[in-house]
């Protein structure tokens, strides 16, 4: 939870509490499962918005804008100190590199295959974390239930582009690493300082590629406005929520909770993009919701 920052404005005066501290305190009062769900919804709405940029700046240009604006916002909000222990810096660097690679692979996949399918394949990453970290047989039941939902979501699709599938698998591997590194980031850094530095590093790595690929199209006013919206919805809001949640729940529980991702992606596709699912796909949504509900109940009983 964020640390309270108090400044004295004069003798006998009341403490002036910063807005950031108040926001951090309010965020800390939200149950971790609710934080994860809010982050998932935000990411999927941001992904739908990002599709509007593909025709103008491509997938690489879109992810460059996302990371650039997200880094600016987080650095301005948290103003992180560069004075950290060597071990903390190692975690931040690893987190930033994985973050950049994960976003790049996700958007490259999204340019080839539908959003719901990309998210479904990408979910193999957190699913692997959930299974790998399991110590009780019931944890494996929730993970397998979520896996059944993933399989059903792809049922009947024979038009998947191979490159898109490979990029989605790469994003899945990055997502698994991201979950573990996020937990380490929460242990070795305070507030959002590690997140801000990691996001800045990811932007530094990806932005040059986006500039070379998209050129001056990145400077169009409407492109910059949409890019800022994508950054807030897809990076700033969800990563902050997820990082706070991972301070309070184990990575394996977080991984199974993220099984909601394919279902939320399908719902966003229906509401925002007009994509209609069949009965089999809605059954998949129910399966992943059941898996997440079971994992959440276990987390509460463990706590």
Image (cartoon, rainbow, N blue to C red):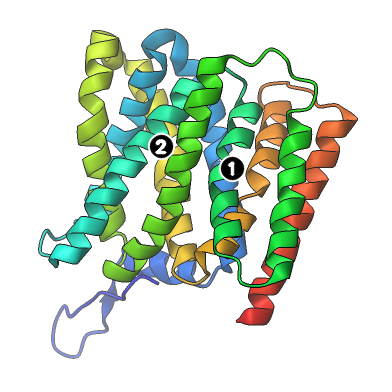
Q: Earlier in the sequence, mark 1 or mark 2?
A: 2
Question: Is residue 111 in view?
Answer: no
Residue under the image location 86 percent in, 32 percent down: 280
Q: In the image as oriented, which residue stretches furthest toward the bottom?
A: 12
Q: Which residue is mark 2?
A: 102
Question: How far across and how far down the image is residue 296, in percent?
Answer: 68, 66
Residue under the image location 13 percent in, 64 percent down: 86
Marks 2 and 1: in contact by CB < 8 Å? no
Residue under the image location 79 percent in, 35 percent down: 152
Front position among marks 1 and 2: 1
The mark found on residue 124 in the picture is 1
Question: How far across and how far down the image is residue 29, in percent?
Answer: 52, 72
Question: How far across and how far down the image is residue 17, in percent?
Answer: 30, 73
Residue 272, picture quadrant: top right
Residue 18, picture quadrant: bottom left
Residue 66, picture quadrant: top left
Q: Secondary structure at mark 1?
A: helix
In front: 47, or 102? 102
């Amino acid at each position: 939870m964020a640390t309270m920052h108090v400044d004295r404005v004069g003798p006998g005066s009341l403490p002036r509490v910063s807005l950031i501290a108040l926001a951090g305190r309010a965020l800390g009062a939200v149950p971790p499962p609710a934080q994860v769900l809010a982050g998932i919804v935000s990411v999927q709405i941001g992904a739908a918005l990002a599709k509007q940029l593909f025709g103008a700046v491509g997938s690489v240009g879109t992810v460059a804008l996302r990371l650039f604006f997200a880094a600016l916002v987080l650095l301005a909000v948290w103003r992180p100190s560069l004075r950290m222990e060597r071990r903390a810096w190692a975690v931040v660097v690893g987190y930033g590199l994985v973050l950049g690679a994960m976003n790049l692979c996700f958007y490259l996949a999204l340019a080839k295959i539908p959003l719901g399918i990309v998210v479904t394949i990408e979910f193999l990453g957190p699913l692997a974390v959930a299974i790998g970290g399991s110590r009780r047989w019931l944890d494996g039941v929730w993970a397998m239930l979520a896996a059944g939902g993933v399989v059903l979501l792809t049922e009947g699709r024979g038009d998947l582009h191979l490159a898109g599938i490979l990029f989605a698998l790469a994003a899945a591997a990055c997502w698994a690493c991201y979950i573990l590194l996020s937990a380490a980031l929460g242990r070795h850094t305070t507030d959002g300082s590690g997140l801000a530095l990691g996001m800045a590093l990811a932007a530094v790595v990806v932005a040059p590629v986006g500039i070379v690929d998209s050129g001056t199209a990145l400077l169009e006013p409407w492109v910059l406005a949409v890019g800022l919206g994508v950054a807030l919805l897809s990076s700033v809001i969800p990563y902050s929520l997820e990082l706070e949640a991972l301070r309070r729940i184990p990575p394996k529980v977080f991984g199974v909770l993220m099984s909601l991702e394919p279902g939320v992606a399908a719902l966003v596709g229906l509401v925002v993009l007009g994509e209609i699912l069949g009965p089999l796909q809605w059954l998949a949504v129910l399966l992943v919701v059941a898996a997440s509900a079971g994992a959440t109940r276990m987390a509460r009983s463990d706590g």
